[in-house]
Structures are given as C-alpha cells and as structure tokens.
Image (spheres, coloured by chain):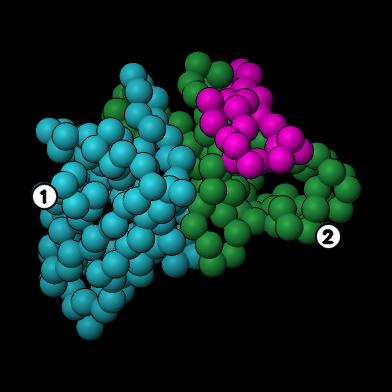
Chain colours: A cyan, B green
Amino acid sequence: EVQMVESGGGLVQPGGSMRLSCAASGFTFSSYWMSWVRQAPGKGLEWVASIKEDGSETDYVASVKGRFTISRDNAKNSLSLQMSSLRAEDTAVYYCARDRRGSRVAHFDYWGQGTLVTVSS
Amino acid sequence: SYVLTQPPSVSVAPGKTARITCGGNNIENKIVHWYQQKSGQAPLLVISYDTDRPSGIPERFSGSNSGNTATLTISSVEAGDEADYYCQVWDSTDDHVVFGGGTKLTVL
C-alpha cells in the first residue's frame, strides 16, 4: 500500500525557518518524482515544489523560490522541504504527493495527510 | 500563466447527475486531471488524463474535455460525493502544475 506521512509542521514566527519531512512507503521511491502541494486555510490547492527521481532537478513556484529547498534521500525513502524566511502567507497545510511526471504532463496519484504550518507572531 | 476557472459551487439532489466544469483557453489541447477533497482529508485523484478512472474510483465518475471546457461528471450522486473538486493541468508556458480554484459540490 502506497503511503506518505508528513511531519515537522507547527507554529513558527515570521522570518523563521522550518523543515518538513515526508516518509514514503509501499512503492519504489527512487523511481518517482515527488512534490509538495499546499493549501492555505479555506483556500484551494497550490503546487509548491517538485524534485526529480534522482534529485538532479528541482522546481519551485515563484513565490517560494530562493526561500524553500526541496530535497530527497532515496536510501531512506524520504522527502524534505526546508523553508526559510517564512511569511504569514506561507501558512497552510503542506501535502507530500507522488508526482507522475511525463513530457509536458504531470499529476499527483497519491497524497499524504498533510502537516499544518502556521506562521504567526 | 495559464488560468483554470471553476464555478465556486454546484448543488445537486441525490440520484441526479452533477457536472463540474473547468474552463481554460483551448483546454482541449491540455491533459486534465481531477481531484476530490472531502472535508478534513487529503485530495484524492478521481480522473486522470481527461477520462481515466484510477483503480477504486466508481464508474459514476467520468471526465471529458472539449474546446475551452473540461467537465467532471458524477452520475447517480450520493451523499458521500459531497466534497471540493479541483481540476489540474500542466502549464507549458511556465512548465508548472496549475490547479483550478475548486468547486464545492453540495448534495441537497
């Protein structure tokens, strides 16, 4: 059974940092792109970042570029999102998702349950 | 960047058919995916590649894509179908994933 379990969320002050983790199981982690998708309270879904199977490529939404870093450890079946210079508008539930990426196409076939990040003083 | 437009809400009586639209410029030239998100839960893929149902998704869920509108159709709607539904495509201009704003389906 494919599973992703996120951890690391919580309350952080504006300008602070936080690291999210996602533990994956039930599939060959190193064979898939992986992504983070977030959802602000009461709002819709927003793609945040993606990373290639071997970690050689990463991509970010413009609003987090330079502040967030996505990484993976294929030996540990683990995905991470290092977030810095956090802003109130980064407050959201952050989902880890398996990314089915092809040529000019991508979708997310499995999602974790999410972890809430609250940026507030 | 590419914009996907969904109606904020759709209401339907049990047993009837619900149609949730996703508008975009020449969206028929893109591949559309649909997600269901029930209250307090993670999104669930219900339609991929315009019309494909993942394993475990009831046949009542179907998708179509033509012109400037993609449509998620749910036939014989049940109370358990009440959820937010999101469409999603690949924006080839920015090379990024794009989501629609979401549609809240209410079962009357």
Q: Residue placed at 48% from the left, 37% from the top?
A: B88
Assess whether residue B107 is covered by the magenta stretch.
no
Taking the spot 49% from the left edge, 57% from the top edge, the residue there is: B42
Q: Which residue is mark 2?
A: B108
At mark 1, the secondary structure is loop
Q: Amino acid at mark 1?
A: Gly
Which quadrant holds residue B3? top left
State the mark number for residue B98.
Answer: none
Which residue is located at x 29 percent, y 29 percent?
A: B94
Q: Which mark is residue A66?
A: 1
Q: Give the image location of residue B46, x and y in percent.
A: 59, 40
Q: Which residues are magenta?
A: B46-68
The chain identifier of the residue carrying mark 1 reads A
Tell me if mark 1 has few (under 14), some (14-19) or many (20+) residues whose alpha carbon lies within 10 angstroms of its own. Answer: few
Q: Are marks 2 and 1 on the same chain?
A: no
Image coords of residue A121 (percent x, y): 22, 83
Q: Secondary structure at mark 2?
A: loop
**In this image, A112 relative to B57: left or right?**
left
Does the magenta segment cover residue B51?
yes
Residues at marks 2 and 1, CA–CA distance in whole angstroms: 46 Å
Q: Is residue B91 left or right of residue A56?
A: right
Q: Amino acid at mark 2?
A: Leu
Judge left or right: residue A33 versus residue B12: left
**Residue A31, quarter of the rendered image:** top left
Q: Chain of mark 2?
A: B
Residue neighbourhood size for the residue with mark 2, other residues' Cα within 10 Å, grouped as few (<14), some (14–19), many (≥20)? few
Q: Position of residue A23 (x, y in %)?
A: 29, 57
